[in-house]
Image (cartoon, helix red, strand yellow):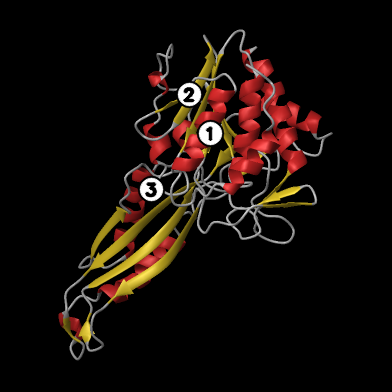
Amino acid sequence: MTDAFDPVSFLDAAVRIESHEDVSEMRAFLVDTLRNHGADPIVDDAGNTLATTGSGSPHVVLNTHVDTVSPHVPYDRDDGRIHGRGSCDAKGPLAAILAAFFRTDPAAGRLTLAVTPDEEVYSTGAAALDLSVLPGVDAPDGDAYVVGEPTGLDVCTAAKGRFEGTVALSGVTAHAAEPETGVNAVAAAEGALSAIRAFDADRDPHPSLGPATLTPTVVEGGEATNQVPADCAITVDRRSVPPESADGFREALAAAVDDATPDAVGVDVALTERPTPFLEAFATDADEPVVRHLSAAAERVTDGAAGEVRPFTAATEASYFSPAPTVVFGPGVLADGTGPVAHADREYVRVAEVERAADALTEALAALVD
């Protein structure tokens, strides 16, 4: 493939395209870019944009997304930075990934680009991703994945998952003048909250991600000020670590709350309904080739300023690709010394970092598939 692609020019144009409510225009721009540089992309039924080159193994997949959060922030450029919504999350990483994809001509493996349309909401694209829709690809999954997100050119090998659920407590209504004749679901919340606080007390922290967290965020209960309430609901936010699954968390929390509340109180724990699986925690061994080569390349192109192997602090679609070796990598940062960057009104990415990310990815891919 040609190496004439300029990631910064692509990014200049991409940030100008609004993709916080509808990704159609941005996806069309991506498809046109791929065709103009010698690729033969397809858009699958889930709206994923895919292109592949090479054959054989290992099959390395480059993934990121074209959607952005709301509201749109207009494009601007100054002092070596590109500002605007998506500049670092994740059109900056996309620009670097495209550059590496176009520069790489696999001699002993396959390289696939898989760009999803719905990462910021339900990850419908990643959940449905099946690489076997590509010509010459038999397996639905790759051998290794690089997920483009703003990591400051560090190589992130793990991230916590995020689950959300509701602890529903049920009792029996009664007149508040005779509370002993009913079963008070709101009063039972005391025991439920105690169980939530102690839920991880006997669990070892993950060696790189640290401890899981469980946070009550919303409490609802009661209908009248003079009535024993029969219902109380506590919404919880779970940031998980491997090897916990969403179903395993739900079952364990239900048992803990049931033990901490009176026998007369009904306990039900339900995960929030969503059309796709929750983003679970993932962890990749630091000895995997995709980690070693990308870390060494990032360290070289930044003269040692980046390339650290560390966890990522936000949930990503990377969890859908694990247990295949998966890393999160890209230009930009979630936050800097001033405050939030990604998802913030001041979102930006440094031009030089986009170029270095492209160089690091190209070097690492050469070691993996050339």
Q: Earlier in the sequence, mark 2 or mark 1?
A: 1
What's under tag 1, amino acid-wise? Leu
**Residue 149 location, quadrant:** top right
Bin the neighbour count of mark 3 within 10 Å (Cα to Cα): few under 14, some 14-19, many 20 and up.
some
**Number of labelled discs?**
3
Label 2, on which residue? 41
Query: Could you tell me which residue is drawn at 40 percent across and 30 percent down?
Result: 129
**Residue 6 location, quadrant:** top right
**Residue 255 location, quadrant:** bottom left
Name the one closer to the observer, 137 or 251.
Answer: 137
Q: Secondary structure at mark 3?
A: helix
Query: Could you tell me which residue is drawn at 38 percent across and 29 percent down?
Result: 44
Contact, mark 2 vs mark 1 (Cβ under 8 Å): yes
Using the numbered discs, state the Cα–Cα distance from disc 2 to disc 1 in whole angstroms: 9 Å
Q: Secondary structure at mark 2?
A: loop
Q: Which mark is residue 30?
A: 1
Bin the neighbour count of mark 2 within 10 Å (Cα to Cα): few under 14, some 14-19, many 20 and up.
some
Residue 78 point in image, percent of width and height: 77, 52
Q: Nearer the viewer, mark 1 or mark 3?
A: 1
The extreme right residue here reads 303
Q: Quadrant of the N terminus?
A: top right
Q: Which mark is residue 249?
A: 3
Q: Nearer the viewer, mark 2 or mark 3?
A: 2
Bin the neighbour count of mark 1 within 10 Å (Cα to Cα): few under 14, some 14-19, many 20 and up.
many
Q: Quadrant of the C terminus?
A: top right
Residue 230 point in image, percent of width and height: 21, 74
Using the numbered discs, state the Cα–Cα distance from disc 2 to disc 3 in whole angstroms: 39 Å
Q: Earlier in the sequence, mark 2 or mark 3?
A: 2
